[in-house]
Amino acid sequence: MIKLLEDIKQAEEITCWMRDKKIPLHDTMQKNWDHYELISLIKVFPKSARILDMGSGHGFTLKLLHTLGFENISGIDYELSPRWRLERLKSLFRKTFSPYSVIQAGDLCNTKIASNSCDFITCISVIEHGVDVEAFVKEASRLLKPGGQMWVTFDYWEPACDNPTEEIKIFGLPWTIFDRRKVEQVIDAAHKHGLELKDAAASIPLCRDKTLDYYGKQYTFMGIAFKKNI
C-alpha cells in the first residue's frame, strides 16, 4: 500500500471526521492524514498487539494509539527532552496516560529491543530527517514478528524540489523532501530485508497538490505500508 495526501480538501475532510469521532488531532492539520491511514491499517489488530512508535517526538501517535484502546504501546526517540521528564512525573502521580511515559531514548537503527517482538511499527515523518534508510528498514524487519506490519510516512514531492533542503535543520536534524527515486530506494531496501509492500500491486501515485508550505518549501506527504514475510 502506497498512499499520498492528495490535496488540502482531503486533509480538511479527514480532520473533520476525526474531530467528530473525538480522535486526538495533530497540531498540524495535514498530519491528521497520517493517523487516518494508520487507523484503517491497525483496526484489524487486537488491542493487546505490541506496537512500537519509532521516532516518537512529542508523542502524538502514541496518544492516538492509547485513545484507540491499544494496551501494549511504546516509543523510541533519539533524545528525551526536559518536558518528557516533567510529563513522566505528572503521569506517575495522576495515574493517567502520558505518551512521554512510554518513550525511551535510543537509536532507531539499533534499538536493542528483542527480535520478532513487535506486531506493528509506526514511523511518522521521521526517515526524511537524516535516517540511514537501509539500516532503519533492516532494524524494523528484525523487530517485527513474521506477518507483522509497518506504516512509515515522509515528506514527498515529484518532480524533486528545485531547491535542496539539506541545509535546513528541523529539531536540529537534517531534512530531505523525498522524491520518486528516494521512495524506490526505500522499497528496494525493504525488500532486501524481508519487508514487502502490504499491497503487492501498489505503485507510486502521481502528485496532485502541494498541501504544505514549510520553510519556503511546498510539498505533500506519502506513506507506505509494509508487511514482514512469513
Image (cartoon, rainbow, N blue to C red):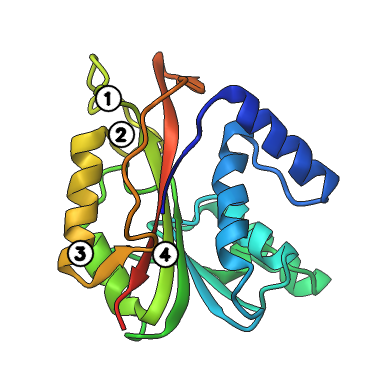
Q: Which residue matches tag 2? A: 175
Tell me the residue that label 1 is attached to.
Answer: 165
Q: Foreground mark, 4 or 3?
A: 3
Q: Quadrant of the N terminus?
A: bottom left
The residue under the point 84% across, 44% down is 20
Task: Residue at 49% x, 56% y: name it.
Answer: 56
Check the image and report above or below for 51 versus 135: below
Q: Residues within 10 Å of mark 1 (few under 14, many from 20)?
A: some
User: What whole-number distance in Å separates the C-alpha atoms at marks 3 and 2?
Assistant: 24 Å
Sequence order check, earlier mark of 4 and 3 = 4
Is there a contact, CB below 8 Å, between mark 4 and mark 3?
no
- Which residue in the protein does label 3 denote? 191
* Quadrant into which the C terminus falls: bottom left
Question: Callout 4: 10 Å neighbours few (<14), some, many (20+)?
Answer: many
Q: Residue at x 23, y 28 (%)?
A: 166
Whether tag 1 and tag 2 are in contact, CB under 8 A, the answer is yes
Which is in the foreground here, disc 4 or disc 2?
4
Q: Is residue 110 visible?
A: no
- Nearer the N terminus, badge 1 or badge 2? 1
Q: Evaluate if marks 4 and 2 touch, with contact meaning CB atoms under 8 Å apart.
A: no
Query: As shown in the figure, which amino acid type bears the numbered disc 2?
Result: Trp
Element under disc 1: loop
The reply, left or right, for residue 142 in relation to residue 84 is left
Query: Looking at numbered disc 4 in the image, what kind of residue is underneath it?
Result: Met
Q: Which of the two marks, 3 or 2, is nearer to us in this view? A: 3
| Label 1 vs label 3, nearer the camera | 3
State which tag comes first along the sequence, 4 or 2.
4
Rounded to the nearest whole Å, what is the CA distance between mark 1 and mark 3? 27 Å
The residue to which callout 4 is attached is 150
Type of the residue with mark 3: His
Q: Quadrant of residue 217?
A: top left
